[in-house]
Every structure is written in C-alpha cells, then in structure tokens.
Amino acid sequence: MKRKVGYFKLYKKYFQIHVQSLMQYKLSFLFTVIGQFLVSFNVFLGVYFMFRRFHQVDGFTYGEVLLCFSITLMEFSLAEAVARGFDSFSTIISNGEFDRMMVRPRNEIFQVLASRIELTRIGRLVQAVIMFIYGISVSDISWSWDKVLTVFFMLIGGTVVFTGVFIIYASICFFTIEGLEFMNVLTDGAREYGKYPVSIYGKRVLQLCTFVIPYALIQYYPLCYLLEKSSKNWYMLLPLLACIFIIPCICLWKFGVRHYKSVGS
C-alpha cells in the first residue's frame, strides 16, 4: 500500500505544474505581470497627486499613507496569489469541477487552493515592496525588532483575512451558483479604500472593520503602533488575533458543502 503524499508536497507539485504552465507562454506572463504593476501604479498616482494638494489626511502624512497602502497591497496580493481559486469558485461549480473534487481523497479547501495559483500577482507585489521602501525613506520611524515583527504580523494577518473573505465569496456560490458582485466591495474594494487608514472613513466604518470584517486589526491599529501614534504595544499582536476570522469563514464553507447539490456539467 502506497503512503499518502503530504499536503505540503502535493501543493508543491501543484505549484510546479502552474509554473510550468506559465512558462509555456513566457511573453504573455511577462506582459500580465507588467499590467498588474501598472494597474496598481495608477492608484499610487492618485495618492501622489492628492498629497500634492493636501499635506496630510486625518493626521497621516504622505509617507505614512504610502506605508499603509503598500502593506495592504502586499496582503491582498499574497492572498489573491494563493487563494484565487476561491475568487473564481463560481466557475468551478458551474462547470461541474467541484463534483470531481468531492470524490477525490483530499480536502476540498486544499483542492480549491491548489487549483489556481496566480503568480502574475508578482507585479502588484513588486510595486507594493517599492512603495514600502520609499514610504520608509520618507517617514520618520525608529525601527526596532518589535516594529519589524509588527509588519510581519500584518502581512500574515492580512493574507489570512483576505483569504477568509475569498472563502466567504466561494461559500455563497453553493447557494447562488454564480458569484455575487457585491462581494467585490470586501475584496477589491477593501484593497482600494485600504490605501488610507480606516479611521478616515468615520467611527462607524472603523467599528465595522474592527468587530465584523477585521480589516482594522490588520491595518489601522498596528499601523498606529508602527508610526508611534499609539503607545499600546499589544496593537502589534492584533493581526494575529484577526486570523481567528478564518474560523467562521471555514464553518460557512463546510455549511455550504453539506448543502451542495450537483449542478451537472
């Protein structure tokens, strides 16, 4: 009897297959990466020209907003790269592919994760890293090990939270077959308004992004600690707390799987 291959090795195999597939069309891959870079660059230009007119927004300077925007963009890019299968889950259901996934001896979440790995999001990630480096250079931050950890925790928490939102989107597809467009407010929309600290949108939005969809836990509060706008050092741990958000997302997914009815092929 053959020993079952571990999830890590299997995911590595899927990753290699995706890379080999992309390398069959190297020029197309390169142009797509450049396109992803330029799309996000347009948003950066919007921030740049706004700060040419206004010197700060709700007490945040240009460099501080760039740090906020770059970290949010890195979080979203990482989540979209690894969890793109959930974002396109309506197609997996409508073409009958999920029926095949259910009879395979592997977890359905793992199969959807591995079904689509968007390496073209490297373009956005590169731009986010460049903005982050520039934001550091124009911001007056006294870096220490705890602040480096804060950024690291923000990236982990943000990737998990955005992945959770993608899972919610996919879970809804069990009942609607087609994806609901309003969910883009929580995915692409969050990336767009995440370029500014959540507090600028008002108290109600801050509360919503703290207790319902925990965007503020991966962005605003740790950013305040990073920029020394708050002395509460436990803010650096809030992104890890935000990872708990993935639990109800997975529960919703399992609820959807239990009520799934095949749509055929």
Image (spheres, rainbow, N blue to C red):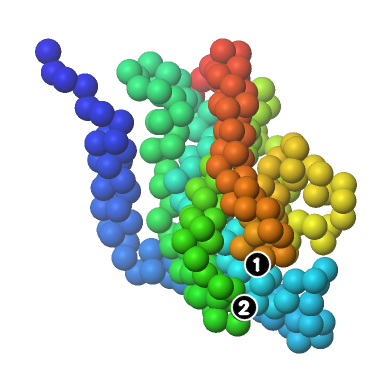
Residue toward you, 46 or 146: 146
**193 over 212 or under it: above or below:** below
The type of residue carrying mark 2 is Ser
**Callout 2 crowding tier (Cα within 10 Å): few <14, some 14–19, many ≥20:** some
Percent from the top left, x then y, of residue 250?
56, 26
Q: Which residue is mark 1?
A: 227
Marks 1,2: beta carbons within 8 A = yes
Q: Position of residue 230 (x, y in %)?
A: 71, 60
CA neighbours of label 1 inside 10 A, class few (<14), some (14 to 19), many (20+): some
Q: Residue 225 appears at what percent x and percent y?
A: 65, 59
Residue at point 87% right, 51% down? 203
Q: Is residue 195 left or right of residue 98?
A: right
Q: Disc 1 marks which amino acid? A: Leu
Q: Secondary structure at mark 2?
A: loop
Residue drawn 35% across the image and 69% down it: 27
- Hey, which residue is sitting farthest left in the picture? 1
Judge whether residue 177 can be spotted in this image: no
> Can residue 63 be seen at all in this image of the molecule?
yes
Disc ID at residue 139:
2
Residue at left offset 75%, top offset 81%: 51
Percent of width and height locating residue 210: 74, 43
The N terminus: image quadrant = top left
**Residue extending farthest bottom:** 52
